[in-house]
Image: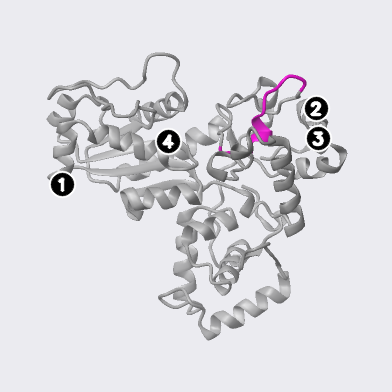
């Protein structure tokens, strides 16, 4: 659910008042484009993902909430039977929420005998663990998950298990940017990275080329020279997703800016209490047949992207605002119907379908991109 400035939410209106009049429309577009994930949605969807994986991965499975580990340190203390402390000293971050999700999964019947409750090396050895599953709420760059995997493997025991092929490393994350997915795929392998949805970014916001330019100009202007590197988010992620428990720094800096005389929206990574009512729970996504109207529309959007030579599933998921699993189903359907070949190039039948789609929807093109931009009103409610 997106924040809608027209509803007159006091904090949103106050935040918009920070901007010069000629920048407020761009500010409204930026805030309207946010996907706000409720804690209920996070728990339901991330928990469902982990439960599904328990039926697919080699077991038993040890699921670790990804967390920051000081550079050069191991996630386990030294010693053959070292224990494991889930949290570092001090108040935990997102790993506390993810840990609680995993606790909920552990209590489900499907997890019995498959998901291990103790992550100390002695219990993992005794249970003959076969999969180490790293779980996170959001990955904007992929760095935290990769660093945590490195910290686990830094212990000689875990390293020896991995070298002998006794364990596999997998990743489960609620949302990840295309940038993060590229790193995670290189580090773990495409078939070992699992997520609920491709994180929305500027690329899938449904803005025209002019609106996109205005939003980016506003972000750069409000960040100034001092925070220019974060103007579009950490490593220029251009992310458009926030959770009840955190606003990632992959969001443009203007959304989490805190300064004297500035009416903040998010306060750093903190989500103010008066914004929590906007994080409404969304219903579970419908599973209508692909042959139905909505399914045909989604297939048409994928065919359009293939016609623009956009063939990477993670990029298609980002632009169409859908899950990688759904993209995989749509690509398989396109091949089954003879619309695309094995290399995802459109067949003659696919070109006919592409012309029909373009004549009906006439999508606008992205600035400096080959792929089309889709107005947000064409998307089904999620």
Please tell me whether mark 4 sits on a helix, a strand or a loop: strand
Q: Image quarter for residue 290? A: bottom right
The reply to whether the C-beta atoms of the residues labelled 4 and 1 are less than 8 Å apart is no
Is 262 displayed left or right of 95 in the figure?
right
Q: Which residue is mark 2?
A: 14
Q: Which residue is mark 3?
A: 19
Local crowd at mark 2 within 10 Å, few (<14), some, or many (≥20)? some
Is 14 displayed left or right of 55 in the figure?
right
User: Mark 4 or 3, which is nearer the eye?
Assistant: 3
- Above or below, 111 relative to 343: above
Question: Which stretch is magenta?
Answer: 250-261
In magenta stretch: residue 253: yes
Please tell me whether mark 2 sits on a helix, a strand or a loop: helix
In magenta stretch: residue 338: no
- Above or below, 321 relative to 175: below
Q: Earlier in the sequence, mark 4 or mark 1?
A: 4
x, y percentage for residue 10?
A: 80, 26
* Front in this rendered view, residue 261 or 167: 261
Q: Which residue is at a point 43% across and 29% down the rendered structure image?
A: 98
Please tell me whether mark 3 sits on a helix, a strand or a loop: loop
Local crowd at mark 4 within 10 Å, few (<14), some, or many (≥20)? many
* Front in this rendered view, residue 30 or 9: 30
Q: Which residue is mark 4?
A: 136
Q: Image quarter for residue 96? A: top left
């Amino acid at each position: 659910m997106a924040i809608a400035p027209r509803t007159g939410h006091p904090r949103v209106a106050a935040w918009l008042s920070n901007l010069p009049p000629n920048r407020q429309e761009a500010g409204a577009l930026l805030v309207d484009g946010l996907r706000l994930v409720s804690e209920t949605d996070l728990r339901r969807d991330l928990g469902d993902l982990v439960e599904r994986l328990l039926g697919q991965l080699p077991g038993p499975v040890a699921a670790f909430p990804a967390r920051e580990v000081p550079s050069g340190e191991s996630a386990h203390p030294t010693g053959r039977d070292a224990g494991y402390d889930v949290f570092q000293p001090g108040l935990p971050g997102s790993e506390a929420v993810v840990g609680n999700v995993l606790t909920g999964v552990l209590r489900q019947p499907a997890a019995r005998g498959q998901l291990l409750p103790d992550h100390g090396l002695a219990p993992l050895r005794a249970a003959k663990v076969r999969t180490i599953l790293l779980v996170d709420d959001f990955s904007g760059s992929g760095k935290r998950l990769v660093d945590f995997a490195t910290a686990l493997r830094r212990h000689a025991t875990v390293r020896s298990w991995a070298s002998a092929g006794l364990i596999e490393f997998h990743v489960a994350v609620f949302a990840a940017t295309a940038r993060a997915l590229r790193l995670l795929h290189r580090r773990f392998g495409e078939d070992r990275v699992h997520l609920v949805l491709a994180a929305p970014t500027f690329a899938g916001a449904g803005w025209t080329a002019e609106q996109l330019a205005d939003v980016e100009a506003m972000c750069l202007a409000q960040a100034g020279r001092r925070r220019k590197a974060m103007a579009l988010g950490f490593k220029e992620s251009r992310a458009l997703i926030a959770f009840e428990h955190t606003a990632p720094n992959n969001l443009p800096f203007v959304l989490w800016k805190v300064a004297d005389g500035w009416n903040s929206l998010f306060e750093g990574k903190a989500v103010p209490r008066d914004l929590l009512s906007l994080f409404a729970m969304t219903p579970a996504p419908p599973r209508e047949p692909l042959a139905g109207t909505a399914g045909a529309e989604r297939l048409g959007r994928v065919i359009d992207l293939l016609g623009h030579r956009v063939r990477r599933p993670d990029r298609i998921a980002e632009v169409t605002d859908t899950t990688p699993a759904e993209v995989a189903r749509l690509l398989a359907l396109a091949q089954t119907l003879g619309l695309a070949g094995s290399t995802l190039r459109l067949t003659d039948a696919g070109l006919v379908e592409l012309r029909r789609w373009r004549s009906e929807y006439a999508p606008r093109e992205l600035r400096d991109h080959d792929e089309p931009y889709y107005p947000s009103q064409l998307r089904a409610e999620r």
